[in-house]
Image (cartoon, grey):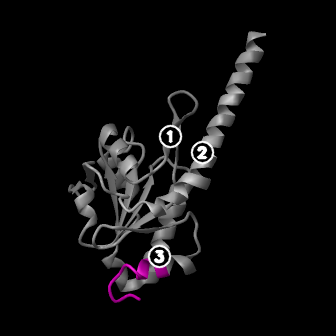
Amino acid sequence: MWKDRTARWLALGAVAAGLAVTLWFAVLDPRVEDVPTVGQGDYRLETTEGAPFTAATLQGQPSAIFFGYTHCPDVCPTTLGDIALWQQELGDRAAAMRFFLVTVDPERDTIPVLADYLSWSQGIIGITGTEAEIAKALEAFRIYAQKVSGEGADYSMDHSASVLLFDAEGRFAGRIGYQEPVETVLPKLRALIPGAG
């Protein structure tokens, strides 16, 4: 009888977790658009180029920021492929836009691991840090990330899949949805790049 109760509680827990994720993507995640302070905070991370990444880093050049991790089986490789396509479509103007991948899995994604993962992706800078600093960044950028247990010591990460856009002043300028058509993505990017309109 206790096995039935345990199974019932586990099932209810799984349903509750699923509802929480659905709520985030359907209700809370879109509301990022209404928060002008997205990206602002006292986080201090490190890039694969050996430079610090803070809120001040967002100033000076438009940026596109994606949160993911190197063990990601689908969303992250797909988004990195999309970014490569956007860069190709932007041509010479692509260099005016910075692209960042911030890990949601600092436990495994060290600087060398991120650098190796992004070695095939031109112009995408990896970012990691301590778990505490990544937590600050997740809060600052309004990003959902949750560890999901797997077999043994293995695990995966549920996380927001949007690419966040920032203008050259470091102000939040909108987002690109997961697998959004390139026809709607390019105008968003060109609007942030001087002379690319």
Using the image, tell me which numbered label, if any, was put on residue 86: 3
Q: Quadrant of the N terminus?
A: top right
User: Is 192 part of what is drawn in magenta?
Assistant: yes
The tag earlier along the polypeptide, 3 or 2, is 2
* SS category of the residue bearing label 1: strand
Q: Which residues are magenta?
A: 187-197
* Whether label 3 touches label 2, CB < 8 Å: no
Helix, strand or loop: magenta stretch: loop
Do callouts 2 and 1 mark residues in contact (Cβ within 8 Å)?
yes
Q: Position of residue 190 (x, y in %)?
A: 42, 82
Image side of residue 41 versus residue 176, left or right: left
| Res 59 → quadrant | bottom left
Q: Is residue 137 visible?
A: yes
Q: Give how far across and how far down residue 175 sits, in percent.
A: 48, 66
Residue indicated by mark 1: 146
> With respect to residue 166, does 154 lie above or below?
above
Q: Amino acid at mark 1?
A: Gln
Give amino acid for label 2. Val
Is residue 161 visible to us here? no
The location of residue 30, given as percent across then percent down, is: 54, 59
Residue shown at 30% from the left, 44% from the top: 129
Density class for disc 2 (Cα within 10 Å; few <14, some 14-19, many ≥20) is many
Is residue 70 found inside the magenta-colored segment of the image?
A: no
SS for callout 2: helix
**Camera-side residue: 123 or 8?**
8
- Number of the label disc, if any, that sits on residue 21: 2
**Pointer 3 local density, CA inside 10 Å: few below 14, some 14–19, many at least 20:** some
